[in-house]
Amino acid sequence: MRVSAGHCSVCAVENKSSAACSREREGCRLCDLPDGSWAHVRELRGGRHLRSRLCALGFTPGAAIMVRGRGEAGCCVEVRDTCIVLDRESADNIVCDKEENDV
């Protein structure tokens, strides 16, 4: 994905200010990454039950993930050589750092 001037280098959302997008500093939600993007899990948010379930599925800090596809209801991702479909709420609670060389 090419990012033009004025867009966040993490998620390609238009950034009208000269300051870095908050997503560059704080990470990007998994559900905001474009299809085909590679990223690493930065942190898991949400309640204890949700964080525990995501960890059991392989979404641990530092784990590499690839977004296979997205929709309004959620997204399909590959983590640890397994494709997993997550609902929107679960994907919203996974904070990622997008791969630098992923264009």
Image: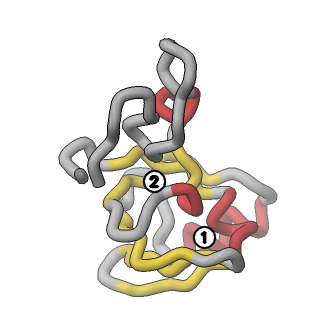
Left or right: where 72 falls relative to 22: right
Q: Earlier in the sequence, mark 2 or mark 1?
A: 2
- Mark 2 is on which residue type? Val
User: Image point 76% across, 55% down: which residue?
Assistant: 46
- Mark 1 is on which residue type? Leu
Residue 54's image quarter? Answer: bottom right
In the image, is residue 28 above or below residue 60? above
Q: Secondary structure at mark 2?
A: strand
Furthest residue in direction left, as rendered: 101
Report x, y in % for residue 3. Answer: 33, 41
Q: What number of labels is visible?
A: 2
- CB of mark 2 within 8 Å of CB of mark 1? no
Left or right: where 12 falls relative to 4: right
User: Image point 68% across, 62% down: which residue?
Assistant: 51
User: What colour-coding does the image apply?
Assistant: secondary structure
User: Image point 61% across, 53% down: which residue?
Assistant: 44
In the image, is residue 81 above or below residue 26? below
The residue under label 2 is 41
Report x, y in % for residue 93. Answer: 67, 57
Q: Closer to the camera, 42 or 86?
A: 86
Q: Closer to the camera, 101 or 16?
A: 16
The residue under label 1 is 54
User: Image point 19% across, 47% down: which residue?
Assistant: 101
Report x, y in % for residue 96. Answer: 48, 49
